Image (cartoon, coloured by chain):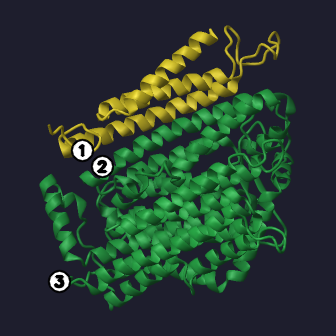
Amino acid sequence: MNGWAHHLIIAPVLLPLAAAAILLFIDERSRMAKGLVSLAAALLLVVISFVLFRIESGPNDFEGVYLLGNWMAPFGIVLVLDALSALMLLLTSLLGLAALVYSLARWHTVGAHFHTMFQLLLMGVNGAFLTGDLFNLFVFFEVMLAASYGLLLHGSGPLRVKAGMHYIAVNLAAALLFLIGVSLIYGTTGTLNMADLAARIPEIEPDRRMLMEAGAGVLGIAFLIKAGMWPLCFWLPTAYSAASAPVAGVFAILSKLGIYVILRLTMLLFGDGPSAGFGANVLLYGGIATLIFGIIGVLASQALGRLAGFSVLVSSGTLLMVLGINDGAVSSGALLYLVSSTLTIGAFFMLIELVERGQDAGAAVLAVTMEAYGDADEDEPEEGDGVTMPGTMAILGTCFAACGILLAGLPPLSGFVAKFAMLSAMMGTGAIGVPPTAAVWTLVVLVILSGVASLIAMTRAGIRTFWGSIEGTVPRVLVIEIVPVMFLLSLTLALTVQAGPAMQYMDTTIRTLANPSVYIDAVRNATVIGDYDDQSKSTGEGAD
Amino acid sequence: MEIILSIAIGVMTTCGVWLLLRPRTYQVIIGLSMLSYAVNLFIFGVGGVKTNVPPLLGDDVATSTLADPVPQALVLTAIVIGFATTALFLVVLLASRGLTGTDHVDGRGDRK
């Protein structure tokens, strides 16, 4: 990966930024032009992240380090592409493309600057996946959050404004915790570069270690709020179910961003040394509590939107729990689960809106409520023009069933493969003949229970929606609305068919993560391009 | 100096957290602002409290007395981002006030 290909690493950040800037200059009335620019950028992003993914899934372990502004590693900011970030980039771009195509049917017309904010959200998420610097991570996190505030409010209406206000307040507080954590870590270690941190943390003096761990703990809370760990998760189902359908679909990646950062930092910083295993118990018990809360929530949900919101929590809880036991084989199963559940939940959020369109009873109540607030027009976008999908109910029903199967983890789709990989690894931990510990048994039981709960909830919702509706009319669904949903679901099918290579990729990823020296060496040995004048540049600032 | 700084951070954090938990949106936004001031001071403090020393290396500046420039850069970024997000929150606050006719965070009026 030399020459121009090396610059591809920064493309997932620059491309959405450029697209967002261009979109600002296009008049709000020329929706077609805006949609096309945004769509082209999203398509290009998929191509770029696929190329990066192919490079990473090649035969040799490769860590692409990109020195921003040609500054040497601990002084300047670096972007690092490894197997994990390449996987997350690809996932983001595919989900982003699906949500964007979906929004083109009608949702992008209900408010201003939808496409700009959407591209900025993609930029923030991609940057957070790529960056190798803690403070830069904060900046990309804030870009992502600021865009998500706007997107959550997209479509307006009292429900969204109320949910958005809670969401913003919670995330502003989380951002402050993030800053406290980062500054404590900087104060005790003197660096913000992740690779440099990983190298310095084992050698830190004992009297400063506690302060550093406190910083890491505070930092962790900021990400756990994003990931939705109980008891930091009460904002999540409300916010996600209030968001417009394509926005909720793309928000499925945001909670996974929290999981990603926790996975990255715990594996990198607390892999070994005196602080090894820091926070593992919090993740384990927090994950268990989240999963239980999610199960109860899934069973208690009447509205489909809340059901999907609690499914996000179930998925987060499972992943946090697995991060807590920190076992290689289980983690690679969990990584497959992460990909599968993100695709599922993204598709499910978009499907819900299509399904609920046909339910007259619920819609009528909603309309009355909206009229009471006096803005019925603002909330519901007008019907879009385009080709209507034939056989609507059959296709909607099939997609709904597929979502149910995926959430419950039943064969034949990838939800089953992922859960099976996790469970078989959990049962197989320890030496031969040693039964799994009580903690592991709890996890196994909870994972299976969460599947049962999802199955019950989805079956109940399905019966009520598709069989039980008396006066329900067939919803008018456009092709470009249902195709993204089918696209995401077919990706999970592809994951099932290609389960072997996929698991192999996850295994390699986890093995690379478990060996942080590869990452550290790659960043430290990254060389600047051209003549480097050591005298004039060696006193540079670490971050800005 | 350190004592004054830490007391200031502590008092502002206390006020900020208390205000953040109040039911009125205006109190919440003031609370968030107070908290962000406290955090900004805190970031500034982790570089070590020094007076009258430049953050730049020069011929007559020893590295031991040098003020750490990184927290200053961090705090600048944090101020800008905090300012922008607070402004955005203010807009949402006004939108909520307009839609619900009350400044309660849940959009409910006081019903006694």
> What residue is shown at x 60% (from left), y 56% (from top)?
A259
Q: Residues within 10 Å of mark 3 (few under 14, many from 20)?
A: few
Please state the horizontal and vertical placement of residue B90, each as a whole percent of the image: 33, 36
Whether residues under marks 2 and 1 lie with C-beta atoms below 8 angstroms apart, the answer is yes
Alpha carbons under labels 2 and 3: distance apart: 31 Å
For label 2, the residue is A161
- Report in which chain the residue with disc 3 lies: A
> Vertical placement of A478 versus A336: above or below?
below
> What residue is shown at x 41% (from left), y 63% (from top)?
A297
For label 3, the residue is A471
Left or right of residue B105: residue A185: right
> What residue is shown at x 37% (from left), y 64% (from top)?
A306
Please state the horizontal and vertical placement of residue A56, each as a whole percent of the image: 75, 67
Whether residues under marks 3 and 1 lie with C-beta atoms below 8 angstroms apart, the answer is no
> Drawn colour of chain A?
green
- Report in which chain the residue with disc 2 lies: A
